[in-house]
Image (cartoon, rainbow, N blue to C red):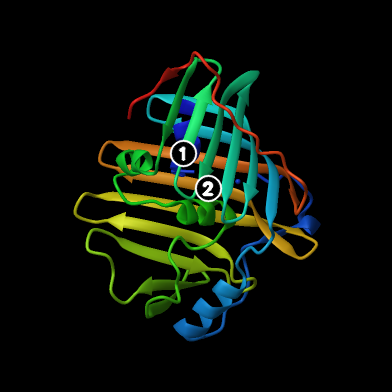
Amino acid sequence: MKYFVLITLFCISITSCKSSKNSIENTNAIKEMSARNVAKKHTQANFNQKTVDAHLKIKYTNPTEKIAFSVRMKIEKGETIWLKGTKFITVFKAKITQNKIQFYSPLYKNYFDGDFKMLQKILGTTLNFNQLQNMLLGQSVLNVRDNRQNIAIHNNAYQLSPRKQAELFDIFFQINPKHYKLNKQSIVNISKKQRLDISYPKYYNEKGVLFPQQIYIHTKEPKKFTNIDIITKSVAFNTNINIDFKIPKGYKEIKL
């Protein structure tokens, strides 16, 4: 189960694995623009392919351990995220839909069959399918056009933040001035000294379609940190993908 939690955490941010001509660096000159126009352009830049089939390398680090493994990720946009993690052998398989999270481990002979309350317990905040999917696709976890935004220029990017922040945390989106995908999104709880930063230093440009090539996820709280680095080794769009998933008989159920 531990390996699946590492993926879904992102909490579930990618060293270069192709030549620069196939990727986009997050640097560009910036000009003044209204928050409304930046929010509009970011929304227009949202990933609009029907399916994703990607091979990932993931490295997980905290104060006591370092783990690296491979993941096959398939996405039916808006419907399903399918994952298979391997470290010499299959460590876990998982299927996430709008209302359900399922995974099992052939290594530990156990399984989980539940909903997003599991992730809420782990992260300490509400998380739904669309927000998790957006994290993977380089999109803001909140719709930046739903509420009025403040705008500033920060780290050579447009930084949007809701004029009325949530009660328990503040959220910030740094948007690239060249392609209007995310450079970074951050969630900060000042009172608890907690923060989550998800950075997207580089994107694949696959026939005009942008997809995160690098994602670095950093969580920090007093006396504790977690780093998750995701490297996309290859990715294909709009292919026929097999997302069959069945929990084997005889496995022990995990209660979370």
The residue positioned 61% from the left and 55% from the top of the image is 77
Amino acid identity at mark 1: Ile
Q: At which x and y percent is residue 35?
A: 45, 82
* Residue position for label 1: 101
Tell me which label, 1 or 2, sits earlier in the chain: 2
Viewer-nearest residue: 237 or 136: 237
The residue positioned 45% from the left and 77% from the top of the image is 145
Is residue 21 positioned above or below 231 on the image? Answer: below
Side (left or right) of 77 relative to 167: right
The residue positioned 33% from the left and 44% from the top of the image is 120
Q: Quadrant of the N terminus?
A: top left
Side (left or right) of 66 relative to 93: left
Q: At which x and y percent is residue 68?
A: 57, 28
Q: In which quarter of the image is the C terminus?
A: top left
Q: At which x and y percent is residue 121?
A: 30, 40
Q: Residues within 10 Å of mark 2 (few under 14, many from 20)?
A: many
Which SS class for mark 1?
strand
Is residue 47 positioned above or below 226 on the image? Answer: below
The residue positioned 66% from the left and 38% from the top of the image is 243
* Residue position for label 2: 13
Is residue 211 positioned above or below 96 on the image? Answer: below
Q: How crowded is mark 1: few (under 14 residues within 10 Å), some or many (20 or more)?
A: many
Is residue 61 positioned above or below 109 on the image? Answer: below
Amino acid identity at mark 2: Ser
Q: Distance between the residues labelled 1 and 2?
A: 21 Å
Q: Is residue 1 visible?
A: no
Viewer-nearest residue: 177 or 57: 57
Q: At which x and y percent is residue 103?
A: 50, 30
Q: Which of marks 1 and 2 is in front?
A: 1
Which SS class for mark 2?
loop
Viewer-nearest residue: 75 or 91: 75
